[in-house]
Image: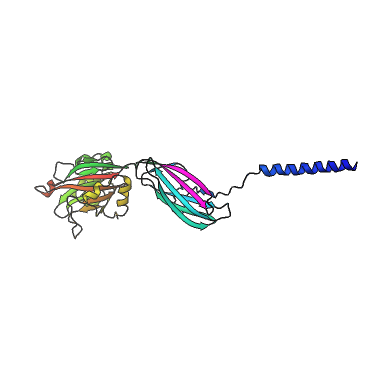
Amino acid sequence: MRKLSYLTGLILLTGLVFTSCNKDENEEPQNVNPTMNFKGGTHTPTGMEYVDGDITLSTNETFVVGITASSNSGKNLTNLNITRKFENGAPFYADTTFNATNFNYDFFFLANNEVGNEDWIFTMEDKDGNKTQLSFTITTEAIPAGIVEYTDIELGSIDSPTESSFASITGETFLITEAANDATIQEKIDFVYFDGATYGQTIVSPDDDLAAQVYSSISNWTTRNATLFSRTQLNAAAYDQIINAFSLLAVTQQLDFDVKFISELKPEPAEGFAVGDVFAFQTATGLFGLIKVTEVNQGATDGLSTIKYDVKVQD
C-alpha cells in the first residue's frame, strides 16, 4: 500500500510538471516594438482635420499629421523616420532624432505640387532598434480654378455708344439706358464707367452718389449693388499669374476695400488710371475680383472716352 501511494503521488507530480511545461511553450513572446498611432479629429488651434489615412488633397495643400508613440522595450525611443515617395520617383527621407519614452508631435506638410499618388511611411525606432511603421497614401488633384476670367471688355463714357456698365457674374456689359427699365439687369451690374474733367477715368459702384450724378437714371434703380474697390501694387505680369481662387484670395485678403470708386484724378493727390494698373473689387455678394486695365482711349471729349480691361473674379 505504501508503494502504491508513493507511485500515485509521483504520477500526480509528474503530471503537474508536464502541464506547466506546456503552458510556457505556448506563451506568446512579449511585443517590444514601440506603440505608434496617428491622431484623429481636429487640430487645435488651426481647426484643420488631422490626416490619419488615405486622403485626396489639392496640390501644394497644407495638411497636418499628429503622431503619438511609446516604448514597449524599456528602452527610450530615439528616431522617427518619415519617407515620402511620389509615383515612380526617388523616395525622400527625413529623420527626427530624440531620446524619450514617449512621443507626441504634430507635423505640418505640403502635399506634392504634381498630380498623382504619394506614399508616406512613418517609422518609429527605439534604442535597441525595435521598430513600428504606419503609412498612408495622399492622392493630389489640381486645385480647382474657382475663378472666371473675362478678357477684352470695353466700356464707354456717358456719350459713347459703347456700354457703360459691367456685370462680373456673367461678364456682360450693358448700356445705362438698357438697365434703366430692367430690374434684372440692375441686379447684375457691379460697376459703371465714365470719364470727366473732375474725376478723369473712373469706375464706380452703382450705389455711390457719384454714379447717379453722372447717370441720373441710376437713382431710380430698384437694385444698386454696393461694390467696393481697392488699388493694388500688382502689375500686369503679377495679374497674369493669378490662376485660381487660392492665388486670387491670397492677394485680395491683404487689401482694404473701403472706397466705392477708383478714379484717375480723385482723391488728390491723383494716383492715376493707366494701362497695366490692377484694381481689386468686392461685389455686394462678397466675391473678390481683379481688373487689369489694357487700354485707355481718350475720346474727342471726355464723354466719348473708352477703356478696355480684363477681369478675374471668384466663381
Outermost residue on the left side: it is 300
Quadrant placement of the N terminus: top right
Residue 91 place in picture, x, y as percent: 40, 45
Residue 133 place in picture, x, y as percent: 50, 46
Residue 239 place in picture, x, y as percent: 24, 48
Residue 131 place in picture, x, y as percent: 52, 48
- Residue 106 relative to residue 141: left or right: right
Q: Quadrant of residue 257?
A: bottom left
Q: What residue span does the magenta drawing correspond to? A: 117-138
Viewer-side residue, 27 vs 315: 27
Outermost residue on the bottom side: it is 269
- Residue 113 relative to residue 52: left or right: left
- Tell me which secondary structure the magenta stretch mostly adopts: strand
- Residue 215 relative to residue 244: left or right: left
What residue is rendered at 15% in x and 52% in y? 196
Question: Do we see residue 79 in this rendering?
Answer: yes
Residue 229 belongs to the span the image colors magenta: no
Viewer-side residue, 67 vs 44: 67
